[in-house]
């Protein structure tokens, strides 16, 4: 049963994203939101780990949180899909359940 | 050093007040609260400096558009600080580099300092408040 994992903390300040990536199963979805969006940006250490995860998991980042922090879709690591709030709702419905890594 | 040290004129001594910002904006309230304290410090004519370390450097990122998250975009305030005579803005070089950012990505002119120099500057302060 595919799970949608959400994470909302900066990967440069906490290890939440690492735990999420370690325990998330192939086929699941991972949505980076709020301060976690910094993990989806090119040129950071987290980007390498995300690229690895993207091989067997679907990665998403919440667009409004990117924009609020001054970043655009072009600055996101390839393989990470930008979604809006409507897209978030669709994902919550699509996956079996949502697991938040707060 | 006493809390109410006075100089020869009898007026209270101007203190060196440093605000250290280590959190990204919007995800928590720290960045906004820090700005409030900066403006209060400036209103009391203190020698205020701002430091941006770790995720705090993200507070200065250009192009913040907060309409869709329903929060006030307070980033233009950093540009207004000059008008309050707050002109000492320091960014840690290591924090910028690890985030793939350069001074061109920031919305105000800052002085970029390596951690050793920034640490020395912290030691010279009378008061350091962390956010």
Image (cartoon, coloured by chain):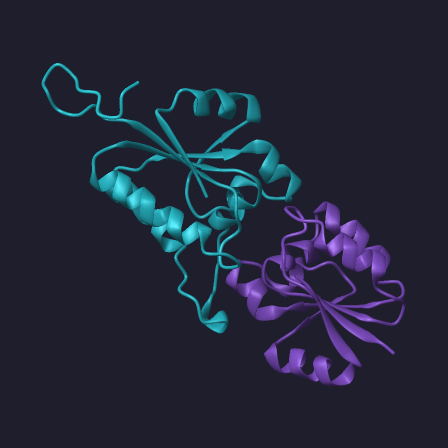
At horizontal 61% and vertical 76% (from top left) the residue drawn is A84
Q: Residue furthest front?
A: B2
| Foreground residue among B25 and A40 | B25
* Residue at screen point 59% across, 44% down: B101
Q: Quadrant of residue A39?
A: bottom right
Percent coordinates x, y for residue B111 in the rendering: 45, 32
Residue at image position (74%, 50%) is A46
Q: Quadrant of residue A102?
A: bottom right
Which residue is the extreme one toward the top?
A: B8
Seen in the image, is A89 located left or right of residue A19?
left
Where does the image place residue B64, in percent across and percent down from the top left?
48, 59
Q: Which quarter of the figure is the N terminus of chain B placed in?
A: top left
The foreground one among B84 and B42 is B42
Say above or below: B47 vs B123. below
Kindly give the residue lying farthest to the left in the view shown: B9
Q: Quadrant of residue A88?
A: bottom right
Residue A70: percent from left, percent from top: 53, 58
Between A18 and B106, the residue placed more toward the observer is A18
Q: Is residue B97 above or below residue A15?
A: above
The tint of chain B in the picture is: cyan
Look at the image and give the colour of chain A: purple
Q: Is residue B17 left or right of residue B100?
A: left
Residue B17, percent across and down? 34, 31
**Image mark count:** 0
């Amino acid at each position: 049963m595919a799970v949608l994992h959400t994470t909302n903390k900066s990967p440069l300040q906490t290890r939440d994203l690492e735990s999420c990536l370690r325990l998330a199963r192939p086929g699941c979805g991972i949505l980076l939101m709020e301060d976690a969006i910094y993990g989806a940006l090119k040129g950071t250490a987290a980007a390498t780990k995300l690229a690895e995860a993207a091989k067997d998991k679907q990665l998403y980042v919440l667009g409004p949180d990117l924009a609020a922090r001054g970043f655009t879709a072009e600055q996101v690591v390839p393989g990470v899909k930008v979604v809006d709030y409507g897209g978030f709702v669709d994902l919550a419905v699509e996956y079996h359940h949502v697991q938040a890594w707060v | 050093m006493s809390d109410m040290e006075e100089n020869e004129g009898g007026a209270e001594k101007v203190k060196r007040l440093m605000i250290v910002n280590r959190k990204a904006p919007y995800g928590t309230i720290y960045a906004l609260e820090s700005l409030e304290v900066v403006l209060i410090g400036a209103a009391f004519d203190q020698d205020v400096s701002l430091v941006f370390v770790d995720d705090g450097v993200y507070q200065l990122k250009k192009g913040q558009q907060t309409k869709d998250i329903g929060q006030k975009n307070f980033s233009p305030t950093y540009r207004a600080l000059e008008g309050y005579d707050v002109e000492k803005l320091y960014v840690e070089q290591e924090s910028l580099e690890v985030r793939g950012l350069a001074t061109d990505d920031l919305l105000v002119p800052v002085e970029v300092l390596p951690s050793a120099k920034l640490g020395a500057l912290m030691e010279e302060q009378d008061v350091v408040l962390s956010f």
